[in-house]
Amino acid sequence: MESSLSDEPILLFLHGVGSGDLNDVGLARLGETLVDLGYPSLAEVRVIAPKYAHALRGTDDNDPLPGITIKDPPRDSVKKNRREFERRTGAIEFRLGLHDQGVGWAGADVVVNASVAVPYFAQARNYLKNTQIRAQVLNRILKTLPGSGRIVIVGHSLGSVIAADLIRRLPIGLEVVGMVTIGSPLANGSFAVDKLQDALKDPPANVAWWVNFWNQLDPVAAHRGVSSVFPWIIDFRIQTKLSLHVHDAAEYLASNAVAAAIGYAIFGSRSKEIATIDGDRDISLDEVEISTLLALRYGHLIKRTLKGDDEDRFSGALRHVQATAVQAVMQRNSNEGRAVPVEFARLAFDLSDSHVMPPIPSPSRYMAEEEAVGFLTTLATYNVIRPFEISVPREKLLHAMKELTAEMGLGSQFGADVFDAVKEAQVALSSSSSVNWLKWGAIGVGAAALIVATGGLALAAAPGVAGAALITSALASFGPGGMIGGLLTAGTLVTAGGGGIAFGLASSATSAEILGAVVEQRLIATILRQKQNLEPDADFWKFLTTMEIEVRREHERQDEFSDPASPSLKELKKKIETTERALKYLSENGLEPGTVDDTVAEIA
């Protein structure tokens, strides 16, 4: 949502029931908190805080309800509008950081409903039930506003309901660069106004983003986020001290989180820019940093192959993934007292500025073939924009992989061989002619949990890793999920050689899907090594045979007593079939240890 205006937006504050904060105590608290956070004071901002408490008590005029000025976008523009809104929402969400969405409080709606019935909330009842009073309030607010420009709306309590009712009635030339609601009862069904939920099923075209702050101690907020009514907004739960004033606007506006959102809407990123990190050129990249850089570079190469809507969606997803992944690695480095290599530091950018494009990773540096097998096998079968899912044609992925391997000094044929190895492995292990293009991210969590649970992690170290301790530390930092944790999990399993993993995969507690994915990943690497005339992975045969023994024994044990059609037996049969197919492929392609060819080679 672009604007050519250079001046700061207007701040519109809509009060709740009562006297309407005649002394503007809440705004004073907001101003103090903004200054504490490093923003300018509100003295530099035009503030409009209309008082309409009297209008909520009765009608003085017969003005009609103001009409709807902001229409729904044309059908062919709905997706684009929603995507751009999500991009801006992601920016403010990133700035606010991780937040606790909280859970609802049983009986909260009853409390709010009861509150509306007491005399103090008569003004709320009047606005909700009396169309003339509602029209009077909205018209009074609209008369205070300019016909064009930029505006930030802050609505407290009933003021949040009025704000939601107002946004579609604003002048067409007035752009809402941010909307913040506090202590809102909109999650409660009693506060529905003129089918507002249906009218706002999609974000209005004139609103950049909407964040709702709620306090778990505030009964008026129904102990529930407003996203339960409008799923496209952000709910941010805050905590304030327990007192009789827990619902007051001043309590909310003294919150750093609330003030940060308002400050960002008014002043932009000027107070909280991402700190520039001076990378150390003498610091070598570790396994985590290499994996992340390769994945991001591969992602940007994939993006270059796309056009139109696919490119737009992929760019938005990659932008988010890069910001969060780089931030996560830098946080890990900070926690461990490790400097950040300059090659990695340059990828940082402020995701909260929705107009900033992510820096493109430099072309990948040279990597030896032996080391590259594990990394590239993982990338070829991994969704590098996880958790987002966008289908990309295989030929485009192949083109990006060939570019990547060419950059790495391996030649484009290495990239082609990676994808050929994937296809061969999947055909070899498939029970039908159809081949599913594996996305490791879908099972990374289960596989990581398996490694930790079986103790196999201590026996699984990817090529170039100083020890399994690095992987253990990385998974502790990033979790088994997410792009980084999933990459590390999959990469580790490419060359995992311990019996602990084989036993864990054979266990009934592990699904046939996870076993199949691990075997497939290992088989891909084995095929790729053969294509590149590298030394075969002799441990893979031992891994498979150890697992085969355990799976067959478990099957025999259960087969004697379980129902023939039991799910557990079916899972074990699938595991046996997968293991047999992998062993068969190795035998038929000269990859079984101790074959005649191996013996002749050794004698020669």
Image: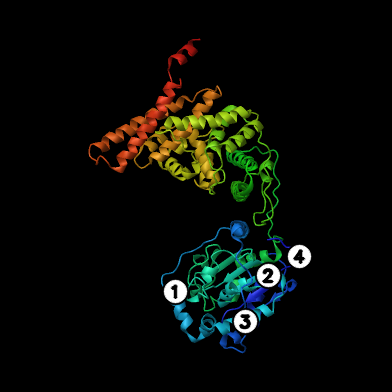
- Tell me the distance, in whole angstroms, between the alpha carbons under discs 1 and 2: 36 Å
Quadrant of the rendered structure where residue 54 is?
A: bottom right
The answer to whether mark 1 and mark 2 are in CB contact below 8 A is no
Q: Which residue is mark 2?
A: 172
- Tell me the distance, in whole angstroms, between the alpha carbons under discs 2 and 3: 29 Å
Please identify, in this view, whether the residue under mark 3 or under mark 4 is nearer the observer: 4
- Tell me the distance, in whole angstroms, between the alpha carbons under discs 4 and 2: 16 Å
Which callout, 1 or 2, points at the residue further toward the start of the chain? 1
Please identify, in this view, whether the residue under mark 4 or under mark 1 is nearer the observer: 4
Amino acid type, residue under disc 3 in the picture: Asp
Residue at 56 percent across and 24 percent down: it is: 532
Amino acid type, residue under disc 2 in the picture: Ile
- Tell me the distance, in whole angstroms, between the alpha carbons under discs 3 and 4: 31 Å
Q: Which residue is mark 1?
A: 109
Question: In the picture, which quadrant includes the N terminus?
Answer: bottom right
| Numbered-mark total | 4
